[in-house]
Amino acid sequence: MSLTLTVTPIHGVCVVHRTPITDERGSFQRLFDLAELDGLSAIGTTFQVNHVRTASAGTVRGLHIQMPPHSETKLVSCIRGAVFDVAVDLRGGSPTFGRWFGQKLSATNNAALLIPEGCAHGVQSLQDNSEIVYVHSAAYEPGSESGLSPSDSKVAIEWPLPVANLSKRDSLCRMSLMDFSEVDW
């Protein structure tokens, strides 16, 4: 098995560790393996793969979520630089509702974050020109997008750097944690 999982305090959120194969030519590592991840948070179906480059350290993207019936699972990997990747549990019936988990992902630490349906996703670039690739289990549906402010005081994420360069959409986000408590994930 080239992928191993570490369970986090948030149900369904896992850190995925990769084991690269190296030789004198360089290295090889599997970013996604359906056989090894199938059955975990419905990641078995892949509809989209996105690549994001963030120019400046401190930039935060998110906290984004797709609402039912278009909710999705994400597998996030950093392929250049380093990021702080965050999942926030927005599942009202979950014992960890409102809690967050963050993981440093980098081009060198061979880790990814698996984020299940019902958890918002945010990412902060820790280095200039960091790049992430993420696999989605559902197609993007603009009418189903939602999210929380990355500075939401009830969630209180401890971002490693001051929050910078929010998009207009993220800076205008007015949803509160309790707005998600009755959603049927």
Image: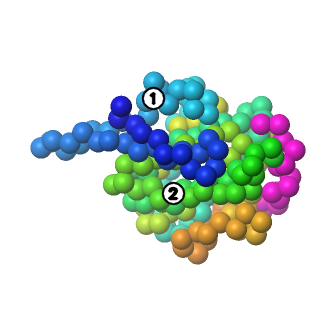
Looking at the image, is 180 positioned above or below residue 71? below
Which residue is more in the foreground, 45 or 13?
A: 13
Q: Label 2 is placed on what type of residue?
A: Gln
Identify the amino acid type marked 1.
Glu
Please tell me whether residue 181 belongs to the stretch shown in magenta: yes
Considering the numbered disc 2 on the image, is that residue within a helix, a strand or a loop? Answer: strand
Please state if 17 lies on the left or on the right of 136 as rendered.
left
Label 1 packing within 10 angstroms: few (<14), some (14-19), many (20+): some
Look at the magenta stretch and give its main secondary structure.
loop
**Residue at coordinates 84% horizontally, 49% vertically from top-left?**
181
Q: Quadrant of the C terminus?
A: top right
| Residue 10 percent location from the top left of the image | 64, 49
Residue at the left extreme, as displayed? 24
Q: Which residue is mark 1?
A: 36
Residue 8's disc number: none
Q: Earlier in the sequence, mark 2 or mark 1?
A: 1
The residue lying at 41 percent from left, 45 percent from top is 17
Residue at numbered disc 2? 103
Observer able to see residue 137:
no
Image location of residue 51, percent across then percent down: 49, 45
**Which residue is pictured at 83% across the width and 37% down the height?**
184
Residue at position x 61%, y 69% in the image? 158
The reply to whether the magenta stretch includes residue 23 is: no
Residue 105 location (% of width, % of height): 45, 55
In this view, the residue in front, 54 or 85, is 85
Q: Is residue 2 left or right of residue 13?
A: left
- Span shown in magenta: 171-185
Dot 2 crowding, Cα within 10 Å, few <14, some 14–19, many 20+:
some
